[in-house]
Amino acid sequence: MHDATHATRSHLRSLGPSPSVPVTIDSGNADSTDGLVASVSPRRYHDSPSGNAPPEDARTSRERVGWQIRATRVLADLLALAVRDGLPRVAWTVGDVGANLTGRCYCRTGADRRSQFDAWCTAVGATPRSELTGFAGITYLRAIAARHDGLIDVIVLADTYPDDDAAGNG
């Protein structure tokens, strides 16, 4: 059986350059044989550290980080405004690409989320877009204050659901 297993595998070609690394190949029987294993180049499937994407230009990376720093400064100003004017709390996200800052309203009821949304739109001078209602009756509220500080776009978001008011009263 040892010779048949060895003969069966001897016709296989190597898929690439193989360093002569002996390994044990178990034929399923009590015996084992030594063979060579083909290696796969470590860069064969991933040509860059971030997968298949081309490496990012260092200047572009610095610009994007600079935009994020500027967005955090705008956020600090908005939080100071919220404390000063008694604005409702919202969840803020700094954009990873581009110069944007997003505030999302998460109050318990749809009416409260809409109230948060309106308050922040007024505070940042955001222009509301047309309300969109999805298939399940979810209404999406969106507004944007383009170039709020000359560069950073401030986006305000809120979603309301058909059963929000019923859930808030119970």
Image (cartoon, rainbow, N blue to C red):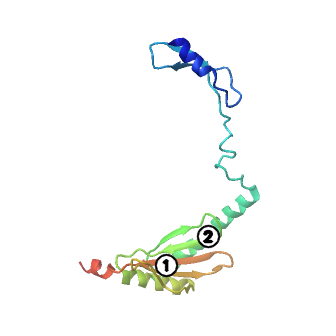
- Towards the viewer: 13 or 113: 13
- Towards the viewer: 98 or 55: 55
Residue at mark 1: 82
Check the picture and name the quadrant holding the C terminus. bottom left
| Horizontal side, residue 31 vs residue 112: left or right | right
| Horizontal side, residue 13 vs residue 127: left or right | right
| Horizontal side, residue 27 vs residue 56: left or right | left
Circle 1 packing at 10 Å, graded few (<14), some (14-19), many (20+), is: some
Residue 95 lies, in percent from the top left, at 59, 67
Instruction: Please report the residue visible at 75 percent of the width from the left and 56 percent of the height from the top.
Output: 57
Q: In which quarter of the view is residue 14 placed?
A: top right
For residue 101, above or below residue 25: below
Q: Name the amino acid, label 1.
A: Ala
Residue 47 lies, in percent from the top left, at 69, 45
Tag 1 secondary structure: helix
The tag earlier along the polypeptide, 2 or 1, is 2
Q: In which quarter of the view is residue 34 placed?
A: top right
Q: Name the amino acid, label 2.
A: Ala
Circle 2 packing at 10 Å, graded few (<14), some (14-19), many (20+), is: many
Instruction: Please report the residue visible at 58 percent of the width from the left and 72 percent of the height from the top.
Output: 101
Select label 2 or label 1 by which is in front.
2
Question: Could you say which disc has been placed on residue 71 in the image?
Answer: 2
